[in-house]
Image (cartoon, helix red, strand yellow):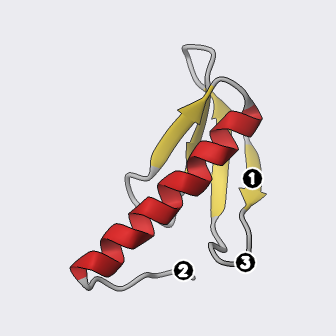
Amino acid sequence: MTEATFPATFKRKVLLYPGEDGYFVIEAPSLPGCITQGKTREEALANAEEAIALYIEVLQDRGEPITGV
């Protein structure tokens, strides 16, 4: 498993690991259910940036707190 940190606007650690289907899977443990994947590590990380941004946007739209920032 590999850990990565996104730009300062996100400040999220993610877990990167190989999936059973040959794709790379990324989970953001501080954002329950925020999981994505990609064919390469780079694609998975790019997808994770987008997934995290969208997750945070939904929290903001709902007026829910954004924890771990």
Check the image and name the residue furthest to the top. 21
- Give how far across and how far down residue 3 sits, in percent: 75, 52
Q: In the picture, which quadrant includes the N terminus?
A: top right
The disc labelled 2 sits on which kind of residue?
Gly
Along the polypeptide, which appears first: circle 3 or circle 2?
Answer: 3
Q: What crowding class fits label 3: few (fewer than 14 Cα within 10 Å), some (14-19), or many (20 or more)? A: few
* The image quarter in which residue 37 lies: top right
Question: Which type of secondary structure does the marked residue at label 2 adopt?
Answer: loop
Which disc, if any, is residue 8? 3
Which disc, if any, is residue 12? none
Q: How many numbered badges does the structure rendering display?
A: 3
CA–CA distance in space, label 2 to label 1: 16 Å
**Residue at the spot x=34%, y=80% of the render?**
60
**Residue at the spot x=42%, y=82% of the render?**
66
User: In the rendered image, which residue does mark 1 sit on?
Assistant: 3
Question: Which type of secondary structure does the marked residue at label 1 adopt?
Answer: strand
- Give how far across and how far down residue 20 sits, in percent: 55, 16
Contact? badges 2 and 1 (CB < 8 Å):
no
The disc labelled 1 sits on which kind of residue?
Glu
- Give how far across and how far down residue 53 sits, in percent: 50, 64
Q: In the picture, which quadrant includes the C terminus?
A: bottom right
CA–CA distance in space, label 3 to label 1: 15 Å
Which disc, if any, is residue 68? 2
**Residue at the spot x=58%, y=44% of the render?**
47
**Residue at the spot x=50%, y=66% of the render?**
30
- Give how far across and how far down residue 49 sits, in percent: 60, 55
Q: What crowding class fits label 1: few (fewer than 14 Cα within 10 Å), some (14-19), or many (20 or more)? A: few
Residue 51 or residue 5, whichever sits in front: 51
CA–CA distance in space, label 3 to label 2: 12 Å
Report whether 55 appears left or right of 36. left
Q: What crowding class fits label 2: few (fewer than 14 Cα within 10 Å), some (14-19), or many (20 or more)? A: few
